[in-house]
Amino acid sequence: MTMPATPPPAPPNPHAPVGAVLRAPATGAQVRVGVMGSAAEVQDPAVAAQCRTLGRVLAERGACLLTGACPGLPHEAVIGAYEAGGHVVGISPATSLREHVE
C-alpha cells in the first residue's frame, strides 16, 4: 500500500485577525519581507500611497517589514506598517548614530 504524498502547506489566511504573526510553515519563524528602494525624496504622491498600502497590508498579514532605515519609498512602507501596528526592523548602513542621522 502506498501512502499519499503530503499535501503542500496551506497558504496564509488573508482573513487572520490583525496582529496575528505570519509564520513560515517549515520553520515557524515570523515571515520577514524586505522593502528596499530609493532614499530620495518621494516625488509622486500616488507611489507614496502605494508604498504605505504595502506596509499596511504586510502588517495586517502579520509579516515583519525590513528596511534600510533610510528616508524615501521604504520609509513610506514603514509609515503604513506602523500605522497598522506592525513589526518593523530598520537596518542602518551607517557606522554610527551620528552618521545615520546626518
Image (tube, helix red, strand yellow):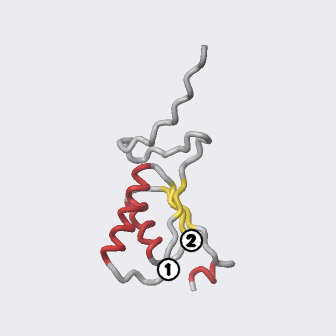
Q: Residue furthest top?
A: 1
Point 59% across, 45% down: residue: 29
Q: Residues within 10 Å of mark 2 (few under 14, many from 20)?
A: some
Whether pointer 2 and pointer 1 mark residues with C-beta atoms closer than 8 Å, the reply is yes
Q: Is residue 62 above or below residue 99?
A: above
Q: Nearer the viewer, residue 88 or 74?
A: 74
Q: Residues within 10 Å of mark 1 (few under 14, many from 20)?
A: some
Picture coordinates of residue 80, whole percent (x, y): 39, 64
Q: Does dot 2 land on a helix, a strand or a loop?
A: loop
Point 56% across, 28% down: residue: 6
Quarter residue 5 falls in: top right
Q: Which mark is residue 53?
A: none
Q: Which residue is mark 1?
A: 39
Q: Residue furthest bottom?
A: 102
| Kind of residue at disc 1 | Ala
Point 40% across, 41% down: residue: 13
Q: Does dot 1 land on a helix, a strand or a loop?
A: loop
The quadrant of the rendering that contains the N terminus is top right
Q: Which mark is residue 68?
A: 2
The numbered mark, 2 or 1, whose residue comes first in the sequence reads 1
